[in-house]
Amino acid sequence: METNTFINKVADKISNLGLTAPAILLLEGCKPLAFLGSQLLLVTQPALDIFVATDLTKNTISLLENPDLLEALIVQLETKPAQLPHLTEET
């Protein structure tokens, strides 16, 4: 999967869940540790591939190890309109 497509997919999922603000806060706070997270994923990738799709793991690793891609995800989240989960009203 192309990197921009993956970033858009992740941003859409976060937005649809209504977690845009917490995600931005978490991503901004963990920027210095993102590279270490990518290296941890590389080490655990053989075990993770049993439970998670290989493409998801590879795309997440590339997102975390490249600060420009991480910043692109944050910008995408900031520009995306916030969507709150739909609440059902009982009458």
Image (spheres, rainbow, N blue to C red):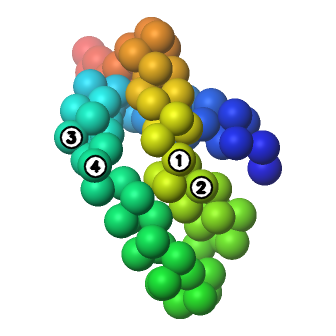
Q: Nearer the viewer, mark 4 or mark 3?
A: 4
Q: For residue 77, which quarter of the picture? A: top left
Residue displayed at 21% across by 40% down: 29
Residue 32's tag is 4
Q: Give the percent coordinates (x, y) of residue 67.
A: 47, 41
| Element carrying mark 4 | helix
Q: Give the percent coordinates (x, y) of residue 6.
A: 66, 42
Please say if the residues under marks 1 and 4 sit with CB atoms less than 8 Å apart: no
Q: CA distance from mark 1 to mark 4?
A: 11 Å
Q: Is residue 63 left or right of residue 90?
A: right
| Element carrying mark 2 | helix
Q: Nearer the viewer, mark 2 or mark 4?
A: 4
Please say if the residues under marks 2 and 1 sit with CB atoms less than 8 Å apart: yes
Q: Give the percent coordinates (x, y) of residue 83.
A: 41, 17
Residue at label 2?
A: 62
- Relative to 78, is 5 above or below? below
Q: For residue 87, which quarter of the picture? A: top left
Residue 66's tag is 1
Q: Can you name the residue that lies furthest to the right here?
A: 1
Q: Nearer the viewer, mark 2 or mark 1?
A: 1
Q: CA distance from mark 2 to mark 4?
A: 15 Å
Please say if the residues under marks 3 and 2 sit with CB atoms less than 8 Å apart: no
Residue at label 3?
A: 29
Q: Amino acid at mark 3?
A: Gly
Of labels 2 and 4, earlier in sequence is: 4
Of labels 1 and 4, earlier in sequence is: 4
- Relative to 72, is 61 above or below? below
Q: Is residue 54 left or right of residue 37?
A: right
